[in-house]
Image (spheres, helix red, strand yellow):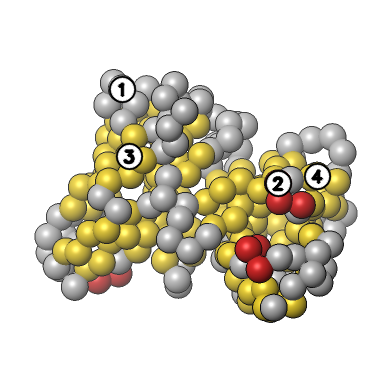
Amino acid sequence: AQSVTQLDSQVPVFEEAPVELRCNYSSSVSVYLFWYVQYPNQGLQLLLKYLSGSTLVKGINGFEAEFNKSQTSFHLRKPSVHISDTAEYFCAVENQGGKLIFGQGTELSVKP
Amino acid sequence: KAGVTQTPRYLIKTRGQQVTLSCSPISGHRSVSWYQQTPGQGLQFLFEYFSETQRNKGNFPGRFSGRQFSNSRSEMNVSTLELGDSALYLCASSLDFGSYNEQFFGPGTRLTVL
């Protein structure tokens, strides 16, 4: 069965600092991988996705992620965060049936 | 184009009652999925509907059910509510069924069971 592990439940960081949110997945087959963001009292918004091709994926709001098959990882990065990036971030893998399996989420807290 | 809408946004019920939540997908989207989000269990898939048929089901008891109408709108029902059913229920719509179809999420319905 596929699963997703987000290694950090909370990540505090100062404004304009770089950040990396870690995600590892387990799957014996080809995967589709996603990062979603959830702002307070809102639904999920897709940040970026990896379906195939280039392992470096660029998304919205300056985020990017790198698919690493050998390490089964899909870490999310941003070189310089803003206060407005404070939110919860979810890594997800799509299983063969087309349903999303989510990690437990990482709360990113950006401090001035 | 309007996004996914969910009604109501907030709901308070007592144990033993039943509840119905509604989801209107993006115009033209034919697939609707439901997820439950709780602090302890995170985001868990409930079920997916396409062309009025349940195509995928998560690991939830039979108290959780759903349906989809011919206009693709979907409802989910929870009967005999338990305290543990308190959660944010998210609906997502996509153009089609199967892999890969980007899912667009609504704002959710927050259910509190007292």
Could you tell me if the residues under marks 1 and 3 are in contact, i.e. CB atoms within 8 Å?
no
Q: Chain of mark 1?
A: B
Compare residues A19 and B16 and report the one nearer the observer. A19
Could you tell me if the residues under marks 1 and 4 are in contact, i.e. CB atoms within 8 Å?
no
Mark 1 and mark 2 on one chain? no
Marks 1 and 3, how far apart at CA? 11 Å
At label 2, counting other C-alpha atoms closer than 10 Å, the crowd grade (few under 14, some 14-19, many 20 or more) is few
Which residue is rendered at x = 58% and y = 64% of the image? A88
Tag 3 or tag 1, which sits nearer the N-term?
A: 3
- Above or below residue B7? Residue A11 is below
Marks 1 and 2, how far apart at CA? 31 Å
Q: Chain of mark 4?
A: A
Amino acid type of the residue that numbered disc 4 sits on in the rendered structure: Val
Q: Secondary structure at mark 1?
A: loop
Q: Which residue is mark 2?
A: A60
At label 1, counting other C-alpha atoms closer than 10 Å, the crowd grade (few under 14, some 14-19, many 20 or more) is some
Q: Which residue is mark 1?
A: B71
Q: Chain of mark 2?
A: A
The disc at residue A57 is: 4
Which residue is rendered at x = 44% and y = 21% of the image? B28
Q: Nearer the viewer, mark 2 or mark 4?
A: 2
Q: Quarter-wise, where is residue A77 in the image?
A: bottom right
The disc at residue B23 is: 3
The disc at residue A84 is: none
- Above or below residue B59? Residue A81 is below
- Judge left or right: residue A20 versus residue B110: right
